[in-house]
Image (tube, rainbow, N blue to C red):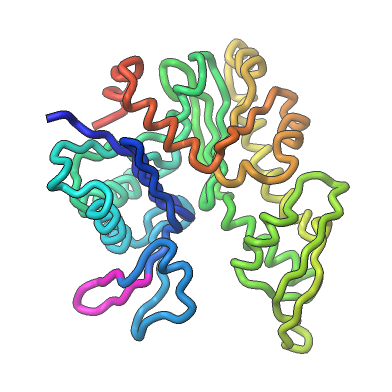
């Protein structure tokens, strides 16, 4: 029987299933009721869009900061997804490949493997995030940065695999919290994470001259009234620059740690970036000025990782490398 290969990415913000011309991508949230047994009442878009929750239930994010915090919930969500899109009565021989942050500990990796396996398929291989993009390059030393919701992965890869890799505990969620903190401190204005996310996407910018502005609803902490006020890109700029400057520092350190020959090759081949945070306005110019190397943003940055990983696992060219990574 022909083996079917799928990529499953249970990220902090979205869970993505890709393979065999299938792409499923929805928020990685679930409405959960706990009792003698844990029950998932809704997941994905349905859970995210619920205005009121059923009695005795909570909204759960099973993956936070790139780490599986609730393996039982993640396993139940994945089981529902697998039953719908790759049911066992249809595909008996299935291999699952899961991209993971380079900085995960052994215990964190085992928790993730157990959560995926509990959903029905036990042939699971974890692939460190920077390696997923190897099919994108010609084999020379290239720097990769993947900006996720929970973490950012930084690494250098070549045809032999990962040269070096690290995980930074800054992602889209941390940036949302920083935006909330800046507005609370500077405007005495309290907003929730959803509002911070909308501000980030609407007016977040690394250009210092950006004058964009939008209205946002929150609470004035001085009079405790809810109101709508206008927030400009300049007002949330300290949060944006703080988070991305930390990532730039890691990129600079990674580059400086390489042997001279590899440094020169990386400077020639440049930096490739993907992940949801790669869509920040002005990011390419910001990193190019800071690192003084070419910077390429994948045009399909949100789903680039799973698509390139699918190419990696389906190509005979990388079979030996995968065997070395793998089981």
Residue pushed farthest front?
A: 21
Which image quarter: residue 78?
A: bottom left
From the viewer's perspective, tell me whether residue 187 is left or right of residue 240.
right
Q: Position of residue 51 (x, y in %)?
A: 49, 78
Picture residue at 44% right of the left edge, 30% below the top: 308
Task: Please name whichever residue, 21 or 173, is drawn nearer the observer in this view of the structure.
Answer: 21
Q: Quadrant of the N terminus?
A: top left
Asked whether 127 falls inside the magenta stretch, the response is: no
From the viewer's perspective, tell me whether residue 22 is left or right of residue 145.
left
From the viewer's perspective, tell me whether residue 119 is left or right of residue 53.
left
Which image quarter: residue 38?
A: bottom left
Picture residue at 15% right of the left edge, 36% below the top: 93
Work out whether 53 lies above or below 287.
below
Work out whether 205 lies above or below 305.
below
Q: In this view of the protein, can residue 126 be seen by the observer?
A: no
| Magenta range | 31-40
Q: How many marks?
A: 0
Q: In this view of the protein, can residue 182 be seen by the observer?
A: yes
């Amino acid at each position: 029987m022909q083996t079917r290969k799928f990529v499953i990415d249970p990220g902090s913000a979205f869970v993505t299933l890709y393979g065999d011309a299938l792409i499923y991508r929805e928020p990685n949230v679930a409405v959960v009721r706990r009792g003698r047994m844990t029950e998932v009442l809704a997941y994905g878009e349905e859970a995210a869009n619920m205005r009121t929750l059923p009695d005795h239930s909570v909204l759960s994010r099973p993956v936070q900061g790139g780490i599986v915090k609730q393996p039982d919930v993640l396993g139940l969500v994945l089981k529902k997804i697998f039953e719908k899109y790759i049911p066992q009565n249809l595909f008996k021989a299935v291999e699952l490949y899961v991209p993971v942050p380079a900085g995960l500990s052994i215990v964190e990796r085992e928790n993730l493997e157990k959560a995926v396996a509990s959903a029905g398929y036990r042939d699971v291989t974890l692939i460190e995030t920077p390696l997923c993009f190897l099919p994108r390059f010609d084999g020379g030393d290239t720097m990769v940065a993947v900006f996720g919701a929970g973490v950012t992965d930084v690494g250098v890869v070549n045809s032999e695999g990962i040269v070096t890799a690290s995980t930074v505990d800054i992602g889209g969620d941390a940036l949302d919290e920083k935006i909330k903190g800046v507005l609370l401190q500077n405007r005495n204005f309290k907003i929730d994470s959803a509002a911070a996310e909308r501000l980030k996407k609407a007016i977040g910018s690394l250009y210092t001259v950006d004058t964009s502005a939008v209205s946002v609803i929150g609470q004035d902490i001085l009079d405790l009234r809810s109101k709508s006020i206008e927030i400009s890109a300049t007002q949330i700029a300290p949060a944006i620059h703080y988070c991305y400057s930390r990532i730039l520092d890691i990129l600079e350190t990674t580059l400086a740690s390489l042997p001279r020959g590899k440094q020169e090759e990386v400077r020639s081949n440049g930096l490739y970036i993907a992940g949801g945070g790669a869509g920040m306005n002005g990011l390419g110019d910001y990193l190019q000025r800071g690192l003084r190397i070419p910077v390429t943003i994948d045009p399909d940055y949100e789903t680039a990782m799973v698509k390139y990983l699918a190419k990696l696992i389906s190509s005979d060219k990388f079979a030996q490398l995968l065997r070395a990574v793998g089981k």
